Amino acid sequence: MTEWHSYEPASGHRLPHDPLNAIVAPRPIGWVSTLSADGVPNLAPYSFFNLFNYTPPLIGFSSMGWKDSVANIAATGEFVWNLVSRDLGEAMNATAANVAADVDEFALAGLETLASLHVKPPRVAASRAQFECKVTQIVRLETKEGRELDQWLVLGEAVAIHIDPAMLDDGVYQTARGEPILRGGGPADYFAITEESLFKMRRPG
């Protein structure tokens, strides 16, 4: 009979490291570029990120604290999501540094930019896919008792999507070819998607 390690989160997990983000993993990375109201570029990764709707395409990320990305989006209503491939992992990690709001993380990580078509924040030139987004909602998260948290869910509609043609076969996007990396648990765990990890299942009926 299994001896479960069970716990109530409000009382603590009784483990060396909180297992929550290792269980709900791996998670795609929200590498989000923004511009401040004064025009300062910002680029930061968020591991609480995903796609939430097809039509229109809605993506979202959650920020622990009112960080520069959220403040910029609240001020301008725009952001860009950039795909993180394995070769961009170290640059992405560099943009996770806690630096002053007037620091340009593109320059900090040595990344070239591309101009966006419909929003002002730049794109990461080396990224294989980018979504230009207009914000639709900024939601302050709450506990079950209704207590407000310093945790902010940002949702945006992709108004332009850019794909490196090398990622397409006969018009079909090849997920593994872009070698996206995903966030695992613990202080440093990441995973890479490769062709070897691919398997297929058709949805029944």
Image (cartoon, rainbow, N blue to C red):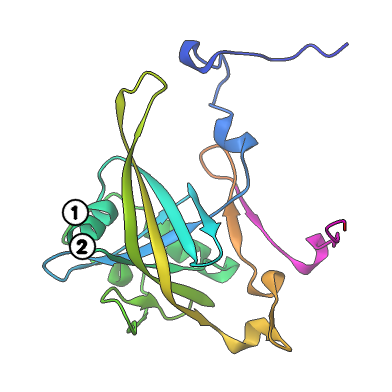
The answer to the question of whether label 2 and label 1 lie on touching residues, with beta carbons closer than 8 A, is: yes
Q: Nearer the viewer, residue 56 or 77?
A: 56
Q: Look at the picture and state if 167 lies above or below 18.
A: below
Q: Which mark is residue 100?
A: 1
Residue at 51% x, 68% y is 83
On screen, residue 118 versus residue 12, left or right, reads left
How dense is the environment of label 1, judged by Cα within 10 Å: few (below 14), some, or many (20 and up)? few
Residue at 61% x, 65% y is 180
Q: Look at the picture and state if 26 lies above or below 151.
A: below
Going by the picture, which residue comes out furthest to the left?
38
Q: Which mark is residue 81?
A: none
Q: Which mark is residue 103?
A: 2
**Residue 116 at x, y = what percent?**
34, 82
On screen, residue 188 versus residue 196, left or right, reads left
Which corner quadrant holds the N terminus? top right
Residue at 62% x, 43% y is 25
Q: Secondary structure at mark 1?
A: loop
Going by the picture, which residue comes out furthest to the front?
205
